[in-house]
Amino acid sequence: MTVLVTGASGFLGGALARELVHRGEEVRILARSTSKLDHLADLSLTVIQGGLGDKAALAKAVAGATHVYHCAGLSADWGSWDDFFATNVTGTQNLLHAAHAAGSVQRFLHISTTDVYGYPKVACDESHPITDVGLPYNKSKGMGEQAVWDFGAETGLPFTVIRPVTIYGPRSKDFVVEIANLLADRSMIVVNGGQAVAGLLYIHNAVKGIIDAANSPNTLSKAYNLRDESTETWREYVDALADGLGLPRAKISLPQGMALGVGRLFETLYGGLRLSARPLLTRHAVYLIAVDQAYAIDRAKADFGFRSAVAFPQAMQKTIDWCNSPEGRAVIKRPKSK
């Protein structure tokens, strides 16, 4: 089969493209001319140059494809609303139209996020409505997912939505490299002692679950939460990363209310000064590490047999091994002296 993967220059899309090639699929990826693709250089795949705003490139990318894995997106806790909207909403709409026009697509697999629930105090199942809490990532991903539901209902395009929680593993920028560098700088902040369940999902388990969902007849027009079956807390995860890398453990802990206030203050300051750099703390980051992320995965287990093939201890060891590889050492700092 010919399949298209968007976002292959990134963490999830790159791992997904690699696994699909290994399974014998004819893989195409959509990538801008500025995208770094060194991590895919050893793979036999076709690169279609362009972005989600390039309709001609999208038409070329989806022509004859049976499956579209839409992993591309702006995933960040800081940035301009225009950038979030252009990528996560308009870009998704453009790809939907191209996939429908191609006439060959048997499944449009859309990568959403559990952030669309709006960070409820109690982790929920897939029946919880998409909830806008006014943060750019949460709002734009909710709008992008809603575009998939609406377009599928209007046109009959076969689709499945995956809502992963906290994906980590080798090459993870957000939950490995950035946390390791904060630990090295002794500036890593946890909230409420780091006692909230992190909702971890190892990259290998994520990729297998996504492919299984895309090829199951049970998953049409449905959404699925995806996380590993174990329930490690943020404290357990951050400490395991610190210990594995020989970095100091996180010492700074703030109560949630104070952390949200500090995050809002930073956002106001950075926004007022029009600073593009990421603030030390944002409300988005606070919600991620303060709220229970043990979202229900019963539907994924029942409909396409989701299981965590790689358990947390083995996943962490593979992650640490990558961090200590030449690729990992190039992006992870050494600890500061006291």
Image: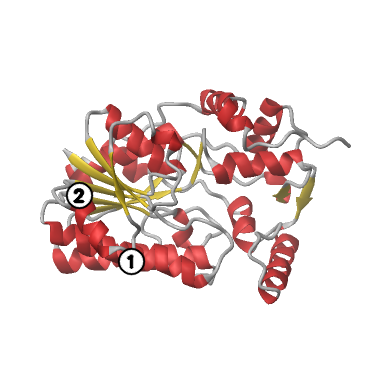
Q: Amino acid at mark 2?
A: Arg
Which residue is drawn at the image coordinates 73% and 46% (left, top)? 188
Q: Quadrant of the N terminus?
A: top left
Q: Is residue 142 visible?
A: no
Q: Is residue 217 left or right of residue 112?
A: left
The x and y percentages for residue 197 are 58, 44
Which residue is drawn at the image coordinates 57% and 59% (left, top)? 77
Crowdedness near tag 2: few (<14), some (14–19) or many (≥20) residues, C-alpha within 10 Å: many
**Mark 2 vs 1, N-terminal side:** 2
Q: Alpha carbon of mark 2 to alpha carbon of mark 1: how far?
A: 17 Å
Q: Nearer the viewer, residue 44 or 145?
A: 44
Label 1: state its secondary structure: helix
Which residue is drawn at the image coordinates 44% and 51% (left, top)? 34
Residue 91, by quadrant, is: bottom left
The x and y percentages for residue 262 are 74, 64
Q: Is residue 107 left or right of residue 295?
A: left
Q: Is residue 55 visible?
A: yes
Q: Which residue is mark 1?
A: 146
Label 2: state its secondary structure: strand
Q: Which residue is mark 2?
A: 107
Q: Is residue 186 left or right of residue 99?
A: right
Q: Quadrant of the C terminus?
A: top right
Crowdedness near tag 1: few (<14), some (14–19) or many (≥20) residues, C-alpha within 10 Å: some
Q: Nearer the viewer, residue 114 or 58?
A: 58
Q: Amino acid at mark 1?
A: Gln
Residue at the limit of the structure toward the bottom, as seen here: 272
